[in-house]
Amino acid sequence: MDFLNLVRNRQSVRAYNPDRPVEPEKLERCIEAVRLAPSACNAQPWKLIVINDPELKQAVAKAAEAKWLGFNNFPQQAPVLVAIVRENPNLSSKLGTILKDKSYTLMDVGIAAVHFCLQAASEGLGTCMMGWFNEEAVRTLLGVPKNKRIELLITVGYPAKDDIRNKTRKSTDKICSYNKYQ
Amino acid sequence: MDFLNLVRNRQSVRAYNPDRPVEPEKLERCIEAVRLAPSACNAQPWKLIVINDPELKQAVAKAAEAKWLGFNNFPQQAPVLVAIVRENPNLSSKLGTILKDKSYTLMDVGIAAVHFCLQAASEGLGTCMMGWFNEEAVRTLLGVPKNKRIELLITVGYPAKDDIRNKTRKSTDKICSYNKYQ
């Protein structure tokens, strides 16, 4: 099993084939990958909302539009959106957050989201994690309580093109050192 | 490639074989998996410090001891520790953080950490992400600047046992709903 190849194949897909639906069983395996994800004190502080009702999906996609930022309309194209809501941690994770001044639940949500996207990539699906959207509009559309944050939306669908781009990343020596911070 | 199997095999390893070293090339592939990880606005807001100097490793492991919490001495057993420092985001990620009141960099650190652990699992290595440790002690030992947070320590080594435990997780209906928050 070559995880590094999967990592190279996962990329942010911003053009979808709107006519090719996502098979429910593939979606279910992506959800299973989230369910099994690790979290601080095993708190599992997340809820997924799968948005596959076409009308609702278009409404949520509209709340994720940010044309002035140069974003195009790929959330409209994607047949499925998934919202990730950050839930309250369990007692031990909450104690850690207070005593160590560290938000474990946000790291946990990142872990859950990338588990979803990696499983999707292994199924041949494209995804894009979006942290920029009109959260209040999405909250109203999905009935998310006021005290919960919707941290991410993920677009899901078959890519319009099947090219894998080279990743633009910092070099290893810029992100890693041995035995001392550099 | 079966990512779900890898997810099932990755587990928090809290007992290591202290006599079996970690091959440098395996460690390098784990670092590469972090280097290629996605992040908000491609900010890559992380630095890894690989701690493999035996004396330094024991000193950092001591700072991760929390016996009163019931933790055992597995950080002492593990031949390698990795610290993840959260770095400043780039301008667009920072703007998003301010305008949307959302810490993208913490989610990014979670993503980077689990990429490391998944690659390690695919190499037959065990890991455990630890968010609870004496950050000031580790900061001094590694020379991390005062304005940077050390979010996680990861233990790395060959597991003392090779059993894969069943994961204790919430059921799917507790973490996922369709088209509406539940």
Image (cartoon, coloured by chain):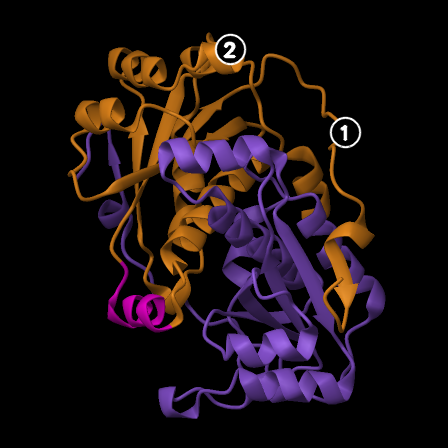
Chain colours: A purple, B orange
Q: Position of residue A97 (x, y in %)?
A: 44, 38
Is any atom of residue A160 visible in this view?
no
- How far across and down, in percent of the image, does residue A52 sit? 76, 77
Front residue of A64/B121: it is A64
Residue A121 numbered tag: none
The chain letter for the residue carrying disc 2 is: B
From what the image shows, is residue A66 above or below residue B48? below
Rendered view: B29 above or below A99: below
Dot 2 or dot 1: first in sequence order is 2
Residue B72, label in figure = 2
Residue A3, magenta (yes or no):
no
User: In the rendered view, does B58 fall on the left or right side of A30?
Assistant: left
Looking at the picture, which amino acid does disc 1 mark? Asn
Range of magenta residues: B89-99
Q: Residue at x 46, y 32 (%)?
A: A96
Q: Which secondary structure is most common in the magenta stretch?
A: helix
Residue B95 shown in magenta: yes
Q: Are marks 2 and 1 in contact (CB under 8 Å)?
A: no
